[in-house]
Amino acid sequence: MTRLLFIKASPRDESRSVQVAQAYLDALRARTPDLVVDTLALWNEPLPDFDGDRANAKLAVITGAGHDAAQRTQWDEITAIANRFAAADIYLFAVPMWNGGIPYRLKQYIDIIHQPGLLFGLDPATGYFGLLQGKRAVLVYTSGAFSPAAPSPAFGTDHHSTYMRAWLNQAGITDLAEIRYQPTLLDPDSDAAFARARAAAAALAG
Ligand SMILES: Cc1cc2nc3c(=O)[nH]c(=O)nc-3n(C[C@H](O)[C@H](O)[C@H](O)COP(=O)(O)O)c2cc1C
């Protein structure tokens, strides 16, 4: 069985990044009979606030201090959400650029799941190490004005793909494939570019 977690970071029904990612998923499903898909539409999913108590619960794990009863309940909830993520073999992310970075709902999700002992470890001598092994991530990036070919910072600065790459690598996921459909708004031939992005996504699955 191959488990794929489809993470939708756009709240828009007509999301371009989700549609490009869907083209990858449709092609992969056609050639992977044992594919099991879990879909995480982040804007429809109840996510706890990562508040002071939860931040303290995280720091207590890093420092080796124990959890009090409230923190234990919160840590159990965090662990359940992180375990759902860790259960996947393949991650499919649809990530629009928002203000140079990733949508805040995705950042909130990462803040919840990126935990010591669950996704990463920290060695005082050598630094962070990832706990997720043998996994692959496919990332679809969209942005309205930014593209790697456009002058930066005039058309924006890419903190979204760079952040996603750094975070996934820190969790141990280094097998990454990226599909860019950029720019979505400034390209006069945007429909053709959209079709090319979906075709590239389908080809990647093959
Ligand atoms: C809140 C918000 C912030 C955005 N910030 C940027 C940005 O910094 N740079 C950019 O090029 N496009 C930006 N855009 C445009 C989107 O990245 C673009 O429309 C993208 O195609 C949306 O993807 P989606 O169709 O999957 O929702 C922003 C859009 C929104 C709604």
Image: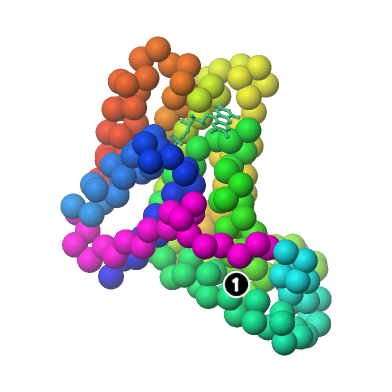
In the depicted structure, whether residue 75 falls above or below residue 193 = below
Is residue 31 left or right of 86 when viewed as pictured?
left
Dot 1 corresponds to which residue? 78
Residue drawn at x 24%, y 48% is: 26
Residue drawn at x 34%, y 31% is: 197
Question: Which quadrant of the structure image shows residue 168?
Answer: bottom right
* Residue 157 within the segment the image draws in magenta: no
x, y (%) of residue 142?
Answer: 47, 33
Q: Report whether residue 57 is seen.
A: yes
Residue drawn at x 57%, y 47% is: 164
Q: Report whether residue 178 is seen.
A: no
Mark 1: which secondary structure? helix
What's the amino acid at mark 1? Ile
In this view, the residue in front, 39 or 12, is 12
**Chain part drawn in magenta:** 31-50
Residue drawn at x 56%, y 62% is: 47
